[in-house]
Image (tube, rainbow, N blue to C red):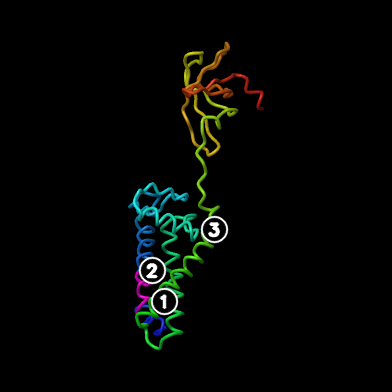
Amino acid sequence: MGRVLEVSFGFPTVIFTTLLLISVGYWLLTTLLGGGGGDGLDLDLDVDLDLDLELESDVGTGLSGLLRTFHLHHIPLSLTFTLLSLFGWAVSVIATSLTTDSGSASFLPALAIFLGALIVSGLITGRIGQALRPVFAPNPAPGRDDLIGRICIVQTGSVSSTFGQAEVVDSEHGSHLIQVRCEQANELRQGSQALIVTVDGDGLFQISPDVEAVS
């Protein structure tokens, strides 16, 4: 244990040790301040899983390319940073322990160990990211067309060709208040069920009182 601590705070492992301590601190703060149902501090360090970096600088372009090369863009950046730090630290500890009797290596060997640990940790993290990609893949938000064929509940006293509102629940259990129209004569009232038939470009939904078609 003493040998591990000695190497952990020697060069170059101390770099990964520092990054790992930052990662641990981040997760502790997230748990303590953001774990109470989202009412705490929002420490959102994640990026979009597709990583569409719209930066025009060379730094932004280079970062995007580097992350894609190692397949590090499939999972949140905070998790990527933590895994890179952890595996980099482990590889650096092992390599330094095998190549030197002290906790630190001389400059050139230390540089080689650091770069090697960074590459190995990137490859391992990339493989883990690919495996976890389905877990973090975002579900596309339901669109207007996804509501066609669903049953809605009328919220107004009547529905005509020029007036009406209804509530509908989408496939993700989200509730929407929509503007509805019905061209045919009907007896729709507040609380009545209706079938969503079509939607136009203005977001007006045509409904039908014939809900037995989907029963």
- Helix, strand or loop status at disc 1: helix
What kind of residue is marked 2?
Leu
Classified by dominant secondary structure, the portion drawn in magenta counts as helix
Q: Nearer the viewer, residue 199 or 65?
A: 65
Alpha carbon separation for disc pair 3 and 1: 27 Å
Q: Earlier in the sequence, mark 2 or mark 3?
A: 2
- Is residue 129 shown left or right of residue 213? left
Q: Does the residue at mark 2 contact the one at mark 1 (Cβ under 8 Å)?
A: no
Task: Name above or below for residue 211 compared with residue 116.
Answer: above
* The N terminus sits in image quarter: bottom left
What kind of residue is marked 1?
Ala
- Helix, strand or loop status at disc 3: helix
| Percent x, y of residue 78 | 41, 58
Q: Which label number is shown at residue 20?
A: 2
| Percent x, y of residue 125 | 49, 64
- Is residue 47 shown left or right of residue 211? left
Direction top: furthest residue: 185
Instruction: Tell me where the magenta segment starts and ends, as one range.
Output: 11-18
- Quickly name the residue at label 3: 130
Q: Residues within 10 Å of mark 3 (few under 14, many from 20)?
A: some
* The C terminus sits in image quarter: top right
Residue at image x 54%, y 62%?
A: 127
- Helix, strand or loop status at disc 2: helix
| Percent x, y of residue 20 | 38, 68
Q: Earlier in the sequence, mark 2 or mark 1?
A: 2
Alpha carbon separation for disc pair 2 and 3: 22 Å
Alpha carbon separation for disc pair 2 and 1: 20 Å
Q: Which label number is shown at residue 112?
A: 1
Q: Earlier in the sequence, mark 3 or mark 1?
A: 1
| Percent x, y of residue 39 | 35, 49
Q: Nearer the viewer, residue 121 or 18?
A: 121
Residue at image x 38%, y 64%?
A: 23
